[in-house]
Every structure is written in structure tokens, then in C-alpha cells.
Image (cartoon, helix red, strand yellow):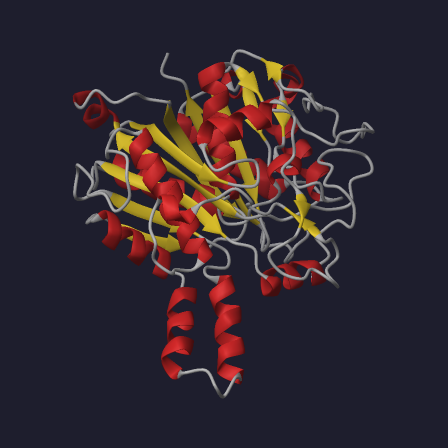
Amino acid sequence: MNRVVITGAGLICCLGSDLESFWERLLAGESGIGPITKFDPTGLRNEEAGEVVDFDWSRYADDEVDEATQFAFAATADALMDAGLTTRGARLSAAIPDIGLVYSTNFGGAYSWESFVVASRDASTGADEAANDFRQFQFQSASEYVRQELELGGLAATLSNSCSSGVSAVGMAFDQLRLGDAAVIVAGGYDSLGLSSLSGLSILRTITAEKCRPFDKNRSGTIFGEGAGMVVLEELDHAKARGASIYAEVLGYSLNNNAYHLTAPDKEGEGMVQVIQRAIGHAGISPDAIDYINAHGTGTQYHDPAEILAIKAVLGDHAYKIPVSSIKAATAHTLGPAGAIELIATVLATRDDIVPPTVNYETPDPDCDLDIVPNQSKPWPVTAAMSLSAGIGGNNGAIIVRSMD
């Protein structure tokens, strides 16, 4: 089996539209969550979200494409440039034409779907305009646009696996590279906020009416956001041959499903226990080798203690010796890209030996009694780290990376 490494990363979220500003703000304990401005949020459970506010599409292209596609393209282009596979600029041909793409999304072009519905009801709207909006909504539209503009001729796939979609995309790419079916794949997720998607999530009552407070005793739900997170995964020998800088090695991952409830987790955390155990087994390391866990940590009443329970069940006493933090109160829950953005934060923790904080933490919960790194980042030696994801429908994901130092 080939060894697989991460050689590039790109992201866009409410904390920033470039890697280093995102990381700086995250470590500073800032939150990018604020009032929704892109549409009227009246009637939603919370009128705040993780809205992207400093993104400039004109830096990349001037095409009129769905905002979610813009996020996916920009994060992909930035990741390829970070990996040294392209030069700076828009509409670049990659140095390796068979680079693959594995994307994940929860809502695709939700804004275009809303535009399509409005256009379809408006007798004055032309059929071509409505048809274009519908095409922009389709889940494969972002992948098609990026592949054409960057002239990428490798594997192309678009997944949708609820809130563990980002890990699912990276995992699929990892398998392809490990088996030798590709040399380079960009993997990750993207989503943009839309009134229809936020309305549905609001009805499910997963959204808090207050602040998102992961692992806090007074937590009452999560807050959703938007953006994209992409990593360049590369076969190790291929990366070495071209002299690439390497962030970390991907050791293993696992996916499963609780088969329990649409939104509520199994209170005993059995599905999460299994996915953590399998990821560690696939990585070929012991539980005691894990130095840091980037938790899913949504701030919902039932998920947070179930996740902590699962971590303790697998890691035992070692769970009390390492930091376990959630970045969702800083980035919001970005849905499709959540697992990829959190993986990027995990990788940067191995690079810099510092872990990001869990912000908005005020009141300790005896059921969440690990070191959740409250409110301030923590210098910490990180060699091997794990990022966890969980989602609606019971989907769980775990991925483990190790620094190459």
C-alpha cells in the first residue's frame, strides 16, 4: 500500500479566506459568527451564522456561478497553489493533468435552487434563466466547473454524507491514492448558506437561539455556517520526487453509521466508539499515540457528552492526558466542509505544536470532563492527531494524521 501525505490546503470560512489568517484568528480565540446579511433571517431560530464576509470572487474569475461553486473553486485553486502544483492566477492548468477531485456537500447550490423556484413561479422569467439556475443547483456542477477551468482530468466524485461529508471525501481520496489508482487528489467539502437550508435546520431544532457553547454545561445547540475546505492528498514517493513540502501523513480513517435516530446520537456513543477504534486500527498505532483530538463538538445537548464518552471508552486514562477541543464556536458548523476544515486545523496543530481553543466556554460540565482547551489556544507537542466528525442520520467519521518531522 502507498503512503499518503497532505501537501497543500485551502479554505474559506467566516474566520478568513486564506489559510494563515484563518489559523491566526482561530488560535487567538476569535469567532467569525455574526448577523446574517445575505438574506432576511427573520423567523429563523437564530439570526446569526458563520457567514463568509471577506471573499472576493473576482480574484479567481468573473463567471456568474453559484456561490457554493465559487467557494469550492477558490479553496481548490488555493490548495493547489499551496502544494506547488500551479502558479498564482486564475484558470490555471495544473502541472499534472490527471489530478483528481473528490468533493462533498450537503446542499450543493442551495442559492441557485431558491432562485430556480422563484424563477419558475415568475411568468416573466425566461426558461433559459430558470434552467441555468437548476443546473447550478446540481451537486456535480461545482466539480464540473472546477475540472473544466483548471483542466483536471483525473477522478471526479461528489459525495453527500451529512456532517461527516468532509471526512468521507478525504477518506475516498486516501483509498484511491493508497491503492495506486491516482498520484494526486484534491479532496474536501463546500456549502453556502441559503434560506431554505437554514429553515430546515432551524425546524430540526439543532440550532441554538443563543451562542454555540461546545462542551459547556449550558450548551443548547449549534450554529451553522458556510465555506469550503480542500486538501491536496498525494502519494508520498510522488511528493518527494517533486520536492514538495509536506504538512502531515494520513495514517488511516474510518466511517460508520449509528443506525439510531435522524438527529440524536446514541447516548452510549457506540457508533463513535467503533469509528475511533477502527481509525486507530487502520492507522496502525496505539490509542496512547494520539496527542490531540479535534472533536466534532457541536454544542448540542446530547452529542457532546456522547462524544466524550466514546473518546474515554477507547483511549481510557490517556484521554485525560491530551487536549480535546472543538472549533465550531469559532467557525460555525460549516456542514459539507466541516470535516475538511477541521482536518486542516488538526494538520496545522501538528505543524505548529499548538492546539486551537474551544471558545464560548463558561460552565464546566461533569459529563464533559476532559481538557477541552477553554477559550485560549494551548502550546502542545502534537505528533499524531485525530479529527472526529458526526452528522445527521448517525454518520460518523474519524481520520488520523501524523507530522513528518
Q: Nearer the viewer, residue 197 or 112?
A: 112
Relative to the observer, which residue lies in front, 174 or 17? Answer: 17
Q: x, y (%) of residue 92?
A: 23, 43
Q: Position of residue 50 (x, y in %)?
A: 61, 45
Q: Considering only vertical position in the picture, is 298 above or below 201?
A: above
Work out which quarter of the rendered image holds the N terminus and state it: top left
201 sits left or right of 125 in the view: right
The quarter in which the C terminus is drawn is top left
Q: Residue at x 60, y 33 (%)?
A: 295
The one of 202 and 163 positioned closer to us in this rendering: 202
Q: Is residue 94 above or below residue 263?
A: above
The residue lying at 75 percent from left, 57 percent from top is 45
Image mark count = 0
Quarter occupied by residue 238: top left
Point 36% across, 79% down: residue = 128
Residue 276 percent coordinates (x, y): 53, 33
**One can see residue 286 in this view:** no
Q: Looking at the image, is 397 positioned above or below residue 205?
A: above
Instruction: Specify the quadrant of the image occupied by residue 293.
Output: top right
Q: Residue 201 at x, y = what percent?
A: 65, 58
Q: Give me the residue at 32% from left, 53% from top.
A: 157
Q: Is residue 82 left or right of residue 221?
A: left
- Please state if 199 lies on the left or on the right of 183 as rendered: right
Q: Residue furthest bottom?
A: 123
Q: Nearer the viewer, residue 356 or 161?
A: 356
